[in-house]
Image (cartoon, coloured by chain):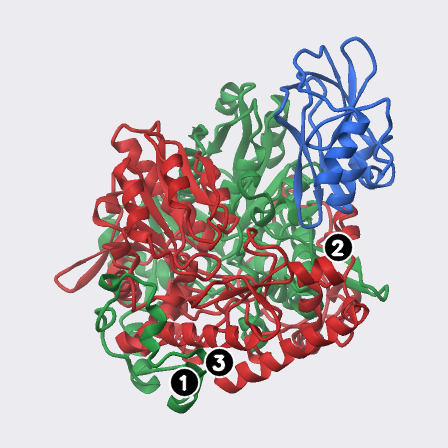
Amino acid sequence: MNNPSNLKYTKSHEWVEFTGESTAKIGLTDFAQESLGALVFVNLPEEGDEVTVGESMGDVESVKAVSDVYAPCSGAVTAVNEALLDAPELINESPYEAWLVELSNITDQEELLSADEYEALCEEE
Amino acid sequence: MELLFEKSIRGRSCSILPKCDVEVTTLAKNHLRQKELPLPQLSENDLSRHYSALERRTHGVNNGFYPLGSCTMKYNPKINETIAALPGFTQIHPLQPDDTVQGSLKVLHLAEKYLCEITGMDAMTFQPAAGAHGELTGIMLIKKYHEVRKDAGRKKIIVPDSAHGTNPATAVMAGMTVVNIPSGSDGCVDIEKLKEAVGEDTAGLMLTNPNTLGTFEKDILEITKIVHDVGGLVYYDGANLNAIMGVVRPGDMGFDCVHLNLHKTFSTPHGGGGPGSGAVGCKDFLTPYLPKPHIGVCDGRYNQQYDCPQSIGKVKAFNGNFLVTLRALTYIITLGSEGIADAAKNAVLNANYLMKRLGECYCIANEGICMHEFVMTLANEAKEKGITAMDIAKALLDKGIHPPTMYFPLIVHEALMVEPTETEGKEVLDEAAEVFLSIYRQAMEDPKWVHHRPTHTPIGRPDEVAAARHPVLHY
Amino acid sequence: MGSYIPSNETQRQEMLDAIGLAKIDELYSQVPSDLILTGGADIPEGKSELSVSRLMSKMAEENVVFPSVFRGAGAYRHYIPSIVNAIVSKETFVTAYTPYQAEISQGILQSIFEYQTMICQLTGMETANASVYDGATAAAEAVAMCRDRKRTKALVSAAAHPDVIETIKTYCWASDAAVELIPVKDGVTDLAALESMLDDGTACVYIQQPNYYGLLEDGEKSGEIAHGQGAKYVMGVNPIAAAILKTPAECGADIAVGEGQPLGMPLSFGGPYLGFMAANKAMTRKLPGRIVGQTKDSNDERAFVLTLQAREQHIRREKASSNICSNQALCAMTAAVYMAAMGPDGMKEAAAQSMSKAHYLASGLGKIKGFELMYKGEYFHEFVTGCPCDSDKLLKHLASKGILGGLPVSDGILWCTTEMNTKEEMDDLISLLKEVCG
């Protein structure tokens, strides 16, 4: 597993890329896409929506399961990766390129893990 | 195999209606559809052959053993079909005056009477069209009850994590929030966790007994008391009633309202997914809230009562799936008191016998005696050899046996839930056991073999990922 | 006692021996003993098939089957082609389970796919589901589909079927969502009132076409008004009328629903019937219930499967938008066979005749004082007339002649005709009314 070291990670298997002072891109990790299996649909929030740290901000569907995507920080949704609506398999193919949402005005954030810490967590699971 | 639309030939038709015997009325163009109606054009022979071909690609109870856990695929008696086809029942308009439908009202009245006896309830409605519909009706009764008592702050419905997905979905449809409680290691309700979960905001608990593992909740009286003590009500999901009908009554266990699946326990056929019927019974104090109309009887005459000021309203037009209720009544009358109890006992006997046989190879999740169904788990086999519940199921398809329920309940990994029902003879169980066991042995020897099953069915494994990613939902 | 248990005493004993029990009652040793019913449930003894047949047939004879039916109001007596019952009574179709195991269920899956296609053809909409319980619950589910975080109120035409209105109200009460009725003017939905009722909290507008009184609504304008204020537009349509009327798609509907009973199901004292639901592309993934999709199998052959299952309760549980599990599968097959047997011309003929006969009857009744049409608008196969005498007495008299007359409603009597009513029948009815009330 190759978890890029420039990214931060959550215990619920999201990755976070801080793109500015209070902006970030969020996606799902390789571990997540592997355990979910082939993804068939994503339900994302809308631009302008407010998300709260630790709460579900959308979900991804495989054929037989649904998994919540949790907000690693509070903020406003400024962009949503529309390409995923037609091709959710991009998350399976390149999880670290297929970002789900972009947040701004980030306030609270939960404790995020480094790539090493996250890898250790995955090994335990 | 072609679709009807692919067989369609322009100008082909069946000749059904005579010419119009009055002057033809036409509407102004702005009322009319602009696009031509593109329905297929076929002859009656075309239709006859088409559906016979579809029949050969379908698997009914008449084609073989159907041990689907939680579905109770028992034999569907043909007398039920004969009665349900009588013109005296089929040609009746739902809005005929009461004095012209005494037969149908009697059916509803008797069905209510007998099923109340069987479940230990005081009143019953047959308006809900299916189990989930019945669940919604039942939880609405509970919601109304609290509303009338000015205690509408009770918004929590407690649901064990072993519950069928309809339970939590129902609670949400009824404006409630779901509190999931984990089951104990034996699959039963964890009493301590239940005590922690109840409170002044508890509207009720939804439970099935036997539970979805096929085990009887022996602490049921304590469970219902815990909920009642905090002012909540207890709802019985009747999906598993086939294990206990005529032997134990939900009403005696402390349940306040129940739903029944007439298409499971009471032998009405599944029809490829419906129509079913989700009769809902309740204790006296909930009766005023039942959907309207109620069927009343006065001096031997039946009537439909619409003056029910506290009723939740209607959950469906008219009287529910009446012909399904009729089939269930016919069945109950056929079996009678002794037959109902006998059916339950033999359902449990068959399940325990099959569990014993399959336990020769398979890992059984149940501890001790099971009720009418049991759960096997392929968790170890999946980890060690990559053989999953899905693989076993697909291998069974080649042998003409409908696979057991897969991946339910969620608390067991790689689950296969087996419910033989009482309408299978011992020799069928023995034959089926041989098939299950030989598949297991062959799979363990050669996992690759099982991954390629089925090979003798009309189609191979379908690509469900493509179907969901790029939905093609019509021709 | 009737029994469907094949195993004889010896076989049962062998099974008990294998499990290590002496008596069958020991299987319930886990159950608290005071819960066990000694003597079974207090219901009568079982009966042989012949006895049951006699008993149930007697009950059927206590109903009155009317040779002549002029009542509709949500349940319609249409002619059912013989091929329909021949097909839907096939044992395999009747007894099969839900087609979760696609490899052995292609028959059921294909028949539903064909049904979905025909519903789309009838309504012009993009996607249809595999059916829900009936037209009333379809309307309630459609209303739920339209709700989101900001818009939760439903505006429902008071000219819709009373049971549909009641069901929508019950479902909305359960979900703590508001419902308001759009008033009726001259028998149709008051569109001016609708305009004033719409606001940014309105989720949807529900209009029935034809409405409860048989009148034609302005399907297109209602949609424009709804959309103009950002609300969704739901149309409840009669499937026979849909063969000739402007389709919900042509009226701009977001969702089309309706009662499918006229498509081959007998009156049956109210059920089982059929709720059809169809949506435009944008609303497709919000549809509740089962949906069949086309795909390929491992040999690259066309195959059908239940798809988009991640919407449903068995996967989403408390996050599902609806709890629906069972549908009305066999009734959906019935509708498909009916539509295939009638074909486009037959469907149009059934619609045209139902409508023409209604106009013939209305014209004849209108010549009797007091039986004039209550409303002026265009109508399909139902209409309301006044009643110059005691409607109760009148209907009783008709009943004594084997005629189920129209339904008494607040303004008069709601009459219905279908292709089943002959000219002779209608002339007889007119004469009778002249006699009694003229």
Question: Quick one: label 3 or label 2, which is nearer the N terminus?
Answer: 3
Secondary structure at badge 2 equals: helix
Tag 2: amino acid: Glu
The percent coordinates of residue B340 (x first, y second) are 32, 73
Q: Colour of chain A?
A: blue
- Mark whose residue sits in front, 2 or 1: 1
Could you say which quadrant of the image residue A1 lies in? top right
According to the picture, the residue beneath numbered tag 1 turns out to be C12
Give a yes or no on whether discs 3 and 2 share a subunit.
Answer: yes
Relative to A7, B276 lies left or right: left
For the point 57% across and 77% down, which residue is it?
B65
According to the picture, the residue beneath numbered tag 3 turns out to be B424
Query: What is the crowding at mark 3: few (fewer than 14 residues within 10 Å), some, or many (at least 20)?
Result: many
Secondary structure at badge 3 equals: loop
- Mark whose residue sits in front, 1 or 3: 1
Could you say which quadrant of the image residue B243 lies in? bottom left
Q: Is residue C344 visible?
A: no
Tag 1: amino acid: Arg
Between the C-alphas of marks 1 and 3, the distance is: 11 Å
Q: Residue furthest top?
A: A21
Please state, as top left, top right, bottom left or bottom right, where the C terminus of chain B lies in the image: bottom right
Secondary structure at badge 1 equals: helix
Q: Chain of mark 1?
A: C
Q: Nearer the viewer, residue C408 or A67?
A: A67
Query: What is the crowding at mark 1: few (fewer than 14 residues within 10 Å), some, or many (at least 20)?
Result: many
Chain in red?
B
According to the picture, the residue beneath numbered tag 2 turns out to be B464
Q: Colour of chain C?
A: green
